Image (cartoon, rainbow, N blue to C red):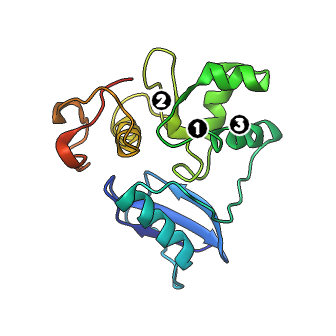
Amino acid sequence: MPQTLIETPIGPIGIRWDGETLIGVDLDPPGAGVEMASETMPPAIGLQLAAYFEKGSTGFDLPVVLDGTDFQQRVWAELSRIPSGETRTYGEIARQLGSAPRAVGQACRANPCPIVVPCHRVVAVDGLGGFSGDTSGRKLAVKRWLLSHEARQPRPCSRDAFESGSLPEYPGGLIPDAL
């Protein structure tokens, strides 16, 4: 399956596809030694991701294959219904699905296409929670950036909240430290 790295405001992300279908988005792609695609990424994938990062557009209508269990599929479908600029807690989604918050968190962690399937919009009842299996560090800074980028976070903070110097500051210097 072809893959490539694209540069974004949150650093390089890995993109995998099959034909015109998005297969995966890797927020922490491996470095050297990754075999890059000899073919060009489908234009729709590049254009829609560029629109998200450049303009905040969240109107993804890409064909996506989400390979997971029935429960994971239900969670990912629920995530896709969370509007940009809004969040839901793990507990809220768990109640809707008749499950437990921890199970929802595990399904979010297994999401093969973060950003497109917006697992970053799911938060803990007392703050951000984790992101892609990380409860601190770079990935949590990425979650803060994505939520801020969607322009709905009420509490800005300074650059000191960034835990990784590799991430650029959000325009205007606003990166929320918690919800």
| Residue nearest the viewer, comparing 90 with 149 | 149
- Which quarter of the figure has residue 153? top left
Label 2, secondary structure: give it. loop
- Disc 2 residue crowd, few under 14, some 14–19, many 20+, Cα 10 Å: many
Read off the residue under disc 3: 75
- Disc ID at residue 109: 1
Looking at the picture, how far across and down is residue 123, in whole percent?
51, 26
Q: From the viewer's perspective, is residue 91 above or below residue 167?
A: above
Amino acid at pointer 1: Arg
- Mark 2 against mark 3, which lies toward the viewer? 3
Q: What's the distance in space between the residues labelled 1 and 2, CA to CA?
A: 9 Å
- Disc ID at residue 130: 2
Q: Residue at x 33, y 34 (%)?
A: 137
Amino acid at pointer 2: Gly
Is label 1 in contact with label 2 (beta carbons under 8 Å)?
Answer: yes
- Disc ID at residue 42: none
